[in-house]
Amino acid sequence: MFVEVCKSTEISDGDVMRFLPEGSEDAIAVCNSEGEFYAISDRCSHGNWSLAEGIIENCHLECVLHGSAFDLKTGWPDKLPATKPVKVFDVKVEDGAVLVDLSSGRISDQGAH
């Protein structure tokens, strides 16, 4: 089920927004990387820190706590100390609105080592 998270103009290139779906305890980090929107679980799989506080670079979101970086397309870390992926969600933009499919959260097998 797709839900509107924000307007596409609310997240500039390189920015991250934390979104907490109604009735859920698990937040989602919605990211704009070079004009493409991505959504991944907000909690780092290593330090349980909010990824929405992180830094985007080359379609990766770096956790500011210990420096692990997660691929926004697959959710897999490519920088230690994290070794486990985070969930990724389907995203689309319609009429200027960023929509996230809350039921699509999954661990991607891409990037598995």
Image: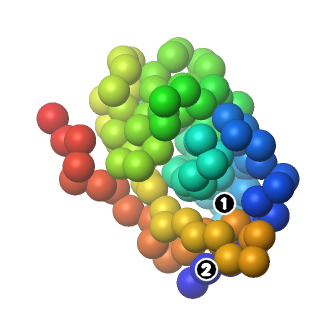
Residue 2: which numbered mark, if any? 2
Q: Position of residue 63 (x, y in %)?
A: 56, 26
Q: Residue tagged by mark 1?
A: 25
Element type at marker 1? loop
Q: Which residue is pictured at 57% across the width and 52% down the height?
A: 36
Q: Residue 49: tell me if it is visible.
A: no
- At label 2, counting other C-alpha atoms closer than 10 Å, the crowd grade (few under 14, some 14-19, many 20 or more) is some
Name of the residue lying farthest toward the bottom: 1
Q: Which residue is pictured at 58% across the width and 70% down the height?
A: 92
Element type at marker 2? strand
Marks counted in the figure total 2
* Residue type indicated by callout 1: Glu
Q: Position of residue 104 (x, y in %)?
A: 45, 72
Quadrant containing the N terminus in the rendered view = bottom right
47 horizontally vs 77: left or right: right
The mark that comes first in sequence, 1 or 2, is 2
